[in-house]
Structures are given as structure tokens and as C-alpha cells.
Image: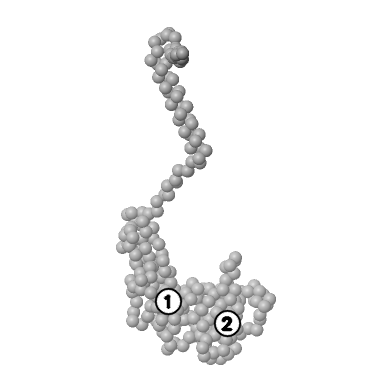
Amino acid sequence: MEKIELEAKTRETAGKGLKVMRKQGLIPAVVYGKKMKAISLSIEEKRFVKTILRSEAGMNAIVTLKIAGEKGKAIPVLTQEVQRDPLTDQILHVDFRHISMDEAIKTKVHIELVGTPIGVKESGGVLVHGLREIEVECLPTNIPDKFEIDVSGLAINDSLHVSDLKTTAKVKILAIPTEMIANCSPPTKEEEVAAPVPTPEEVAAAAEGVVEGDKAVADEKVKEKSAPGAAPAKEAPAKAAPAPKAEKK
């Protein structure tokens, strides 16, 4: 594993003075641990970003923190947390955790997917990345930089889980074995838009239109059966009601 050294200075600045510190290219930080008292520090932002955040191990890189002004003060640490401004993404504060090189620790390791699933290439499927980091327990010197898992063999509806990760006996995985890491889902279908349900008024209007339409069609058929030039057929006169019978005296 790459050895990284980072110089730091103790600080007493707090509150509004931290803004001035950041404008000078320095980051307020703190280091703490089980066997030491917390120390407030300042570190160079460019150096921290270049040597730690952009390293292969990232925040899992073991850093030897050298505190200026204190001879022989070299503290092995891990970067526990990086606080950023939600709007500008500027680093506001860094927490370092003191570690013992001969004591197992718990930390999280990034999971990287490698390859393109066959279900994506041939069937238009969608690769879903589930678990993106995983908690492990091991000695600081055995912390993996990352876990790589090959997804190229995934067909539609195939999945890979925590149990598929390859590791050594020196690294204990603490996640549930059945947790999903990657899945090749079927291609998404366009949703069919359901026809709007007509209101009672629209149903009544439609029915009235059908009746009027049928009557018009019937009248047209009668006209077609009449001889050319003939007068329209007269309606038969209604039969007269029978005269009442005379009563016998």
C-alpha cells in the first residue's frame, strides 16, 4: 500500500477566523482516537486533495500525519469525514481518525463495476448499480483500495450479490451476503395512455346523436326506394272509430 505523509499545524483559530484560513488555502481539521486527546489542526487543501482524495485508495489511504513543531510526532490516521459546502463543494473541515497498525478496524470500501452486461448489449437491458460501498473489518494495512466485480456475463434479470465478491481471509466482509450489487433489468416499456372515461353527460349526448343518426339513415333508405319523380308516399288515414250501437228500449 502507498505510504502518504501529510504535514499539519496545530491551530487555535475558530469561528469567523476559519473563513480567513480557508481563503489562505488551508483547511481546518481535527485528529482524534481512543488513545489520544483530540488535536485541532490546519492542513494545506491542495496537498490534501492531491495526495489523499485523488489517490487510488482515497479516504482509505493510511496517512502519516506529521505535526509541525513537535519532534517525532507522526500519527497514523485514516480520513474519517470530509465536510463540504453543499453549494460550492468547497472543503470546510476534515476529520482524521487515529489508528493502531496492529488493531483491526472497520471501514467502508468502494465497489466498482467492470464491463458491460450481455443483456445490455444484445437485449437493450438496463444495468442497475445497487450497493456502491461495503463495510469490512481488517488490519489497516489490509484495507482494499476497492472491490472490482465483472458484470459482463449478466443477462436480463441476472444479478450479482455481496456473496459474489472476491476477497482474502485477511478481510472480513460485514455486509449481508444476499445484498444486491448489480442487476440487469429488462428494457423499460413506454406506458400506454388510458382512454379518458366519459362523463354521464357525454354518454347521454353520444346516445342522442346515435338515435338521430339512425333516423336520418332510415329516411334516406325510404327515399331510395321511391320511384324517380313519384310523390312521396302518403300516410294511411286513420280508421274512424265505430259508431255506438243504439240501446234497445
In the displayed structure, does residue 242 sit left or right of residue 81? left
Q: How many marks?
A: 2
Is label 1 in a helix, a strand or a loop? strand
For label 2, the crowd category at 10 Å Cα-Cα, with few meaning under 14, some 14 to 19 and many 20 or more, is: some
Q: Nearer the viewer, residue 100 or 183?
A: 183
Residue positioned most to the front: 249
| On screen, residue 183 above or below 219 | below
Q: Quadrant of residue 242?
A: top left
Q: Amino acid at mark 1?
A: Glu
Q: Name the residue at 54% across, 90% down.
A: 36
Residue beneath disc 2: 30
Residue 2: x %, y % from top left: 44, 79
Judging from the image, what secondary structure is the residue with disc 2 in?
strand
Q: Quadrant of the N terminus?
A: bottom left
Q: Nearer the viewer, mark 1 or mark 2?
A: 1
Q: Which mark is residue 87?
A: none
Residue 148 appears in the figure: no
Q: Name the amino acid type tagged 2.
A: Val
User: In the rendered structure, which disc, 1 or 2, sits on the residue that comes first in sequence?
Assistant: 2
